[in-house]
Amino acid sequence: MGLFDFLTKEIAIDLGTANTLIIMNDKVVVDEPSIVAKNIQTGEIVAIGKKAQKMHGKTHKLIETIRPLRDGVIADFQAAEKMIRGMIDMIPGVKGFFNPSLRMVICIPSGITEVEKRAVRDSAEHAGAKEVYLIHEPMAAAIGIGIDVQEPQGNMIIDIGGGTSEIAVIALGGIVCDKSIRVAGDDFTKDIEEYMRRQHNILVGERTAEAIKINVGSALTELENPPEDYAVQGRDLMTGTPKEIIVSYSEIAHALDKTITKVEEAILNALEMTPPELSADIYTTGIYLAGGGSMLRGLDKRISMKTKLPVHIAEDPLRAVARGTSIALKNIDKFMFLIRD
C-alpha cells in the first residue's frame, strides 16, 4: 500500500438506462434511478436519482425530468455528466476537504460505437475521474455471477437491462460472439402503456406502467405461483376523468409477447453464430440470465422452452453487472485484457 493511496478512491459504476449502481470497497454505496430533474430557466439540476424519479411525470413547465441514457448509451451528455458527478458526491467520504482522485471502471453495452464509448469516458473524466476503464456488460455480468471467464469453457450470458439486451458467448476471458439489441425493460414498459390505452381506454404514465410490470409482469400466460391482480389508476380516454381498473398477469403476458419474441430471436441468432465446440459447452452449462429484465416472471422458463436449454437466473440479477465491474476493478492487472483504457 502506497503512502498516498488514501488520495485515490476506486469505484465501479454500472451506468444503466434505468438504474445506476456504484460500488466502492465491495459495498453498493449508490443505487439510484438514472434520472435528473432540471430547472429549465437556470439550467440548474434540482434533483438526482430517487428524488428526481418522484417528480417524473408530475413536473410543471419550469422543471423537466431527463433520463440521460437511452438504449444503454448517453443521449444527453451534459445531464449524464451532472448525474454521474451528483451520484459520486453521494458516496460517503468522497466529498470533503480533500477531493480524492478517482479511478473508475464503467460497464458499457457490447454493441456500443466508438463515439458512444468516447461520450462515456468524457462524462466520467468531467465528473472527476483521473483513470477510466471500460468493460463490456456481458463480461461484467459473467464475472458477477461467479463464472471463471478465463477457462476454456463456453458460457452464454444474457443481460436484459433497461435499454439493451446483451447476449454473449464468453470463453478464455473474451467475448467470442455477441448480439446486442436495443430491446429491453423500457420496451416492456412501453408495451404496457400501449396495451392499457388500446385495450382499456386508460392513459397511464411511465411510472405506473413500470409498477404494473413489477407487480404483475409475466412472460407466460400460465404461472405456477401467479401474482394477485393489480389495481391501476389512470385517465379515462373517453371521459377524461380519473379511473381505476384491475389487471391480471396473463393480460400483461399478452401485452409483452411481441417484445419477448424479439429477445428470443436474438438469443437464437447468437446461438447460430456460436462455434460448435462452444455450443457443446453451452448444452451442458446452459444459459445465464442477469439484469433487471431477467426478473420478469416466467421468462427463464419461456427461454428454456424456446432454446431447449437449461436457464439459470443470477442470484442477485440487478447487481450482477455492478459486482462483476467491482471484481474487475480490484483485479485490473488480471483482467487487463478485458478492460479497455
Image (spheres, rainbow, N blue to C red):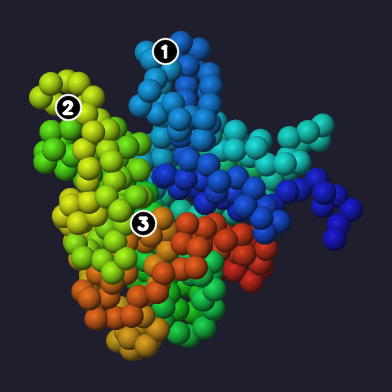
For the residue pair 208 and 324, the one nearer the viewer reads as: 208
Q: Which residue occupies 42% across, 63% down?
A: 290
Q: Residue furthest top?
A: 41
Quadrant location of the N terminus in the rendered image? bottom right
For the residue pair 195 and 245, the one nearer the viewer reads as: 245
Q: Which residue occupies 53% across, 22% down?
A: 46
For the residue pair 196 and 95, the one nearer the viewer reads as: 196
Q: Which mark is residue 101?
A: none
Q: Which residue is mark 2?
A: 236
- Mark 3 falls on what kind of element? helix
Given the image, on which type of amino acid does mark 2 rest?
Answer: Asp
- Mark 1 falls on what kind of element? loop
Label 2 or label 1, whichever comes before in sequence order: 1
Label 3 or label 1, whichever comes before in sequence order: 1
Q: Which residue occupies 42% across, 44% down?
A: 18
Quadrant location of the C terminus in the rendered image? bottom right
Label 2 or label 3, whichever comes before in sequence order: 2
Q: Which residue occupies 81% across, 35% down?
A: 98
Q: Which residue is mark 3?
A: 293
Given the image, on which type of amino acid does mark 1 rest?
Answer: Leu
Binning the other alpha carbons within 10 Å of mark 2 as few (below 14), some (14 to 19) or many (20 upward) gives some
Specify whether residue 166 is in view.
no
**Residue 203: image x %, image y %?**
21, 31
- Mark 2 falls on what kind of element? strand
Q: Which residue is mark 1?
A: 62
Pair 2/3: label in front: 2
**Residue 17: image x %, image y %?**
41, 45
Labelled pair 3, 1 in contact (Cβ < 8 Å): no
